[in-house]
Amino acid sequence: FASQAICYAFRKVATNINEAHVDESVIKAVISKLFVLMELLGLIDMNLLATCILFHYNKSDKTLRIRMFGDGVYYVNGKEYIVEQNNTPDYIGYHVQEGWKDIQKYLDKYPEIVYDDVDNFMICSDGIKSIFLPQFVKTPDPKKSPEILLFSPPVSSNYLTRMWNILNKEGYQLNDDLSIISYATDS
């Protein structure tokens, strides 16, 4: 619910964003929408706990901009970046009912990060680090490891779903949510 509510709020506020980033006025407008939603439905902050990862990739100049509220993992040109918050993520939902001065402090803690000359990237929830093989499962085919299947450049729109199905058949399990957005150029 929380992820979808945040997504709906961004769509409502930012229907025509053509900029290379989402500025803080848009984020504050989204937080305002979430506050109204909480008031209307009688929700508490616990109902809006989800990582929010904002990103924009400009194909022509190969620039990636990322802003992460919560925890997660992302890869840029094969290099891993972990946003770890010791399993106690600082979600937007915790701050929706704060005053604007405190909201600004929260936003300042998580600035936009810009990467240049990006040929490929993956943006993931922290579930990517929670894939495991149970103790008594036979050793799987090494060509079917999570790193090989999930980190390879996608060849179709349903590639990641297909690869997870293969991993599942090999016995791999997950004890967290898993979201992956993957992009790679042909070069």
Image (cartoon, helix red, strand yellow):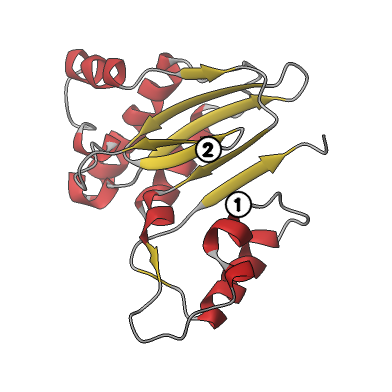
Q: Residue at x 58, y 70 (%)?
A: 142
Residue 130 higher or lower than 162, as above or below: above
**In the displayed structure, does residue 169 sit left or right of residue 40?**
right
Residue 140 higher or lower than 177, as above or below: below
Answer yes or no: is residue 186 visible: yes
Q: Of label 2 and label 1, which has the lower sequence position?
A: 2
SS for dot 2: strand
Residue in front for this viewpoint, 110 or 41: 110
Which corner quadrant holds the N terminus? bottom left
Q: Residue at x 25, y 43 (%)?
A: 38
Query: Pointer 2 and pointer 1: residues touching (CB < 8 Å)?
Result: yes
Where residue 56 appears, as percent x and y from the top left, is 59, 27
SS for dot 1: helix
Quadrant of the image occupied by residue 18: top right
Answer yes or no: is residue 44 visible: no
Give, as a three-letter code, the residue at label 1.
Phe
Q: Residue at x 40, y 74 (%)?
A: 133
Q: Which residue is mark 2?
A: 75
Quadrant of the image occupied by residue 118: top right
**In the displayed structure, does residue 117 sit left or right of residue 12?**
right
Where residue 78 appears, as percent x and y from the top left, is 58, 37
Q: Residue at x 53, y 62 (%)?
A: 146
Which corner quadrant holds the C terminus? top right
Give, as a three-letter code, the residue at label 2.
Tyr
Residue in front for this viewpoint, 133 or 114: 133
Residue 151 numbered mark, or none? 1
Residue 163 higher or lower than 17, as above or below: below
Quadrant of the image occupied by residue 33: top left
| 10 Å crowding of disc 1: few (<14), some (14-19), many (20+) | some
